Image (tube, rainbow, N blue to C red):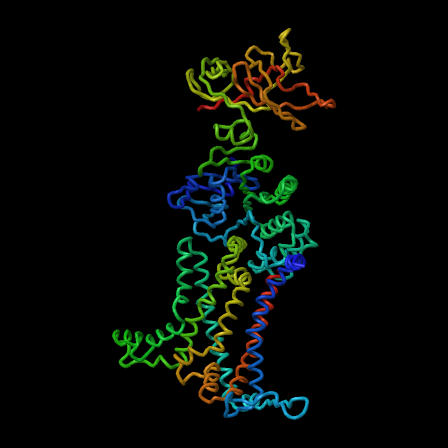
Amino acid sequence: MSETSPLISIRGITKSFGNFIAVDNIDLDINEGELFVLLGGSGCGKTTLLRMLAGFEKPTSGTISIEGSDMTGVEPYARPVNMMFQSYALFPHMSVERNVGYGLKREGVARAERKKRVDEMLEMVELEQFSKRKPHQLSGGQRQRVALARCLIKRPKVLLLDEPLGALDKRLREQTQFELMKLQDRLGTTFVVVTHDQEEAMTLATRIAVMDQGKFVQVGTPAEIYEMPQSRFVADFIGSINMIDGVVKSISGNTLTIHAESDDANYTVESNDQIEIGDQVSLAIRPEKIHVDAYDADNNSNPSEQKSDNTDKTDNRFIGTISEMAYLGGTSTLRVTTRGGRVFQVTSTNRKRHLTGKHDLDWDDQVEISFSPSNAIVLKS
Amino acid sequence: MSHRISDWLQSHWKEILLWVPFAWLLFFFLTPFFIVIKISIAEPLIASPPFSALLEWGDGLLPGVSATIDNYAYLWEDPLYVKTYFNSLQIASVCTVFCLLIGYPMAYGIVRANGNWKLILLLLVMLPFWSSFLLRVYAWMGILADQGTINDVLLWLGLIDKPVRLLYTEFAVYVGIVYTYLPFMILPLYANLEKLDFSLNDAAADLGARPTTTFFTVTVPLTWPGIVAGCLLVFIPATGEFVIPDLLGGGNVLMIGRVLSSEFNANRDWPVASAVAVVLLIVLVVPMMLYHRVQAHESNS
């Protein structure tokens, strides 16, 4: 935590609708200048939490304070936050200009000053020539920028964005992601973004909170969330992962040997967690962290150039067959079935061009897969 | 041959379909209207029918035309008619405003009510249509009479010593018209508010607008077509209303519908009655054109 007090401080916030608890006793601090992403599936409570920050929902219990002042009982129109709605909620009867100027007019900003600031803002989002248009005469991307401009012109302390890119097509979404980040960097405004799209979250966020059933499952940087998930839920939710259930058989230092009953195999993994022999654990390994090499059954040697860094005896090496393969251009996703019968998902980078259409690796090829103990994650189940 | 007919039907069925209601209106609206215009420029006679013919077939080849604008001149000269027109417009305007003031919050409430309640409330708005309009006006006579429900309750409460005159006053006419035409205000407003995206209200609040500002800058402009439709649906029939001023207003309230009726029935002066009707129509065509323009505007955007 930084030495300065957090910009947003959420303490024990709970919101229930009848018997349904949408947000369950959440504590959170968000610092100034962060791009904080609330990530979760539908109905996990992320939007409710955002709406409580904006003041549209009253918390059942708990407090929210912004810049040290308690927001309980403060109406939405008096909060130093602005929200960009999922549907954009542009006023259909007003021109772009009047939509953007609406918030300033409510503040009582004089006409000339208002005009100047609206023009500046429209220039920033590159919509100067559309100022007289009505929202229905704009494309989806343009509408999104109007919505953004309408919020930012109020110079809010915090900008809340509800699925900001949800209504855009994939190509535009990727482009807009970077524009949002640039804008946030330039203005220094704190952004709180709600999304269900993990890729979007990973790209945008300085920090992510993964939500499930009204609770935070894990809060951390994108890298922490991806590389060090603290639970099966997070590991499963973000990216793809191979999950191996087993029992700890031996411990030496921080190296554990885990025996998985289903394929009767031993796995070696490093962990600094408090784990004892006999514990039920899950071992998780990302598909791109598994090496795959062609296996030469005759001399039983590995021709791979990466040999040097994983020839250690404790390596997790398994012989298997490629049972499925998807060529994705830059990478290929393989499913390798080991002799023990376990299926590993493996991502391999296609470094060489395959002009003949024949890959190094192909269906039904014998391969050797391996992963280093430090690349696997141990999750207590 | 039959092939040709079916082909023709195939390619023109849309036009045919549109022509049916059009022909209906042409025949059943325009024909009587021209008859009324014809009578309004005739002279009254003590005969059957009680007016002179427009065309006199004499010896010549062409018929002689006898038309007069005396009836219209008479309406203009007699201050009673001018006053009655203005009185009708005034009563209709005031009733329209009251219907809007009562109807808008009701429509808003119905739209914001949840599922089952919404249905029940809408049903309650339409419930009066299930009984005769005349019957409901008679019921109001019972409520407003000197020995009626309101006076009975006020007497019983000791708030008054002798009955207050309610029936056969302008007040009774206002009550009757507002009561009768309220559903015609609520239903178009409901239809309009129902389509309204309430996240716009949240957006306005988020941008710093207080609830009243939000209402006047977002909700009202977006429901304007509903407001105009509701107002015209109340104003137009209320101006020509006959039953309510006749039964609840007695002889004390001058409205053009009653004057028309007495010219026609009591005085048996069909030409003047027709002139009254034609002028009323012209007076009402203006708001009707307005309605049309707003509707056209709405369907454009």
The residue lying at 58 percent from left, 84 percent from top is B38
Query: Is B271 or A92 nearer to us in this picture?
Result: B271
- The residue closer to the viewer here, B144 or A169, is B144
Residue A357 appears in view:
yes
Q: Which residue: 64% across, 6% down?
A: A299
For residue A330, above or below residue A137: above
Residue placed most toward the observer, B297 or A124: B297
Q: Looking at the rendering, which quadrant does residue B26 occupy?
A: bottom right
Q: Please tell me which residue lies in front, A253 or A90.
A: A90
Measured as percent of width and height from the top left, residue A100 is found at: 61, 55
Q: Residue B10's image quarter?
A: bottom right
Residue in view at x 54 percent, y 49 percent? A83
User: x%, y% of residue B111?
Assistant: 46, 57
Residue B211 appears left or right of B175 = right
Residue B36 in percent (x, y) is at 55, 82
Image quadrant in which the C terminus of chain A is located: top left
> In x, y percent, where is residue B183?
44, 66
Picture residue at 54% right of the left edge, 68% below the top: B228
B32 in relation to A224, above or below: below
Q: Inspect this view and state whether residue A185 appears.
A: no
